[in-house]
Amino acid sequence: MTSLEKLRDVWATLGRDDPLWAVLSRPDKRGGGWSNEEFLATGAIEIDSQLAALATFGVPARFGLALDFGCGAGRLTRGLSRHFERVVGVDVAASMIRKARELNADVGNIEFVENDSARLDTIADASIDLVYSNMTLQHIPAALAAGYVAEFLRVLAPGGVASFQFVDGHDGSWRGRLFSIMPNRLLNPLRRILWRRAAVFEMHSLDEATLHALLRERSDLRLLGALDDGAAGRGWRGRRWIVERALRAAD
């Protein structure tokens, strides 16, 4: 089984069993603890906050088409739909896409697409004003995740911006030290016991040096921000990158 096939299989199972908890894994929400309204409200709050932060950089230039990568049950896709003319949410798991469509059937400017490829084949070059991703790349093996970031940069429209969260290693806490010496093959049995799930998501680090190498390949891209981000939780050194594509090619 390839890393992509394994990823799809795990998230398809999580999407069938407890999709809202799989997206926002708060201990008190396991086993259907999220209400739809409460879950979706978290997406509106997050998107409003992140767009306000992007506005300090003067991006994006337009609010036409947004992409929610790793959309899960569509909480952030819905949040984006309040600001953009159209939003596409993509996810590797068909079960998550079904749940997203169910929860957001009342929103007319959203499209949900199952993406079972290592590329974003359904998204045209230079077509997206905002690529947004949170708590997704951290669950994808590094080589596959780096390929998706390259796709983010491919689909960015001039004046567009990509804002994406990932982890680039472990922090100095006891949890971080534990994660640094125990690979996923040893952590996964513990996760199955703790979460009471047969299918469990993994954590993967993506080296920032790899991302810098991607930027060096394109003169029209600029790193606006490389920020600490705590979304991954204790034990992980979380980061958020904000990358802009220039409105005009450099002379």
Image (cartoon, helix red, strand yellow):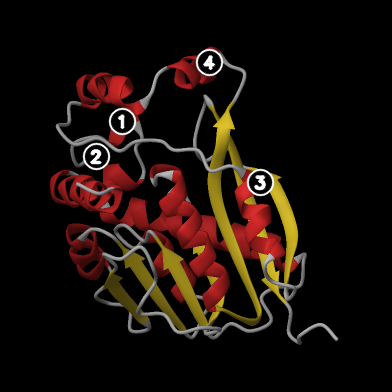
Cβ atoms under marks 1 and 4 closer than 8 Å: no
Q: Which residue is mark 3?
A: 209
- Quadrant for residue 159, please give it: bottom right
Q: Name the residue: 34% across, 27% down.
A: 184
Residue 15 location (% of width, % of height) = 20, 51
Whether residue 133 is visible, yes or no, is: no
Viewer-nearest residue: 79 or 37: 79
Callout 4 amino acid: Arg
Element class at badge 3:
helix
Q: Amino acid at mark 2?
A: Gly
- Closer to viewer: mark 1 or mark 4: 4
In the picture of the structure, the residue carrying the numbered disc 1 is 28
Work out whether mark 4 precedes mark 3 in sequence or the reverse, and give the earlier one: 4
Locate residue 79 relative to residue 173 in the image: left or right: left
What is the number of the mark on residue 33?
2
Spatial distance from mark 1 to mark 3, Cα to Cα? 37 Å
Distance between the Cα atoms at labels 1 and 4?
26 Å
Closer to the camera: disc 4 or disc 3?
3
Q: Which residue is mark 4?
A: 177
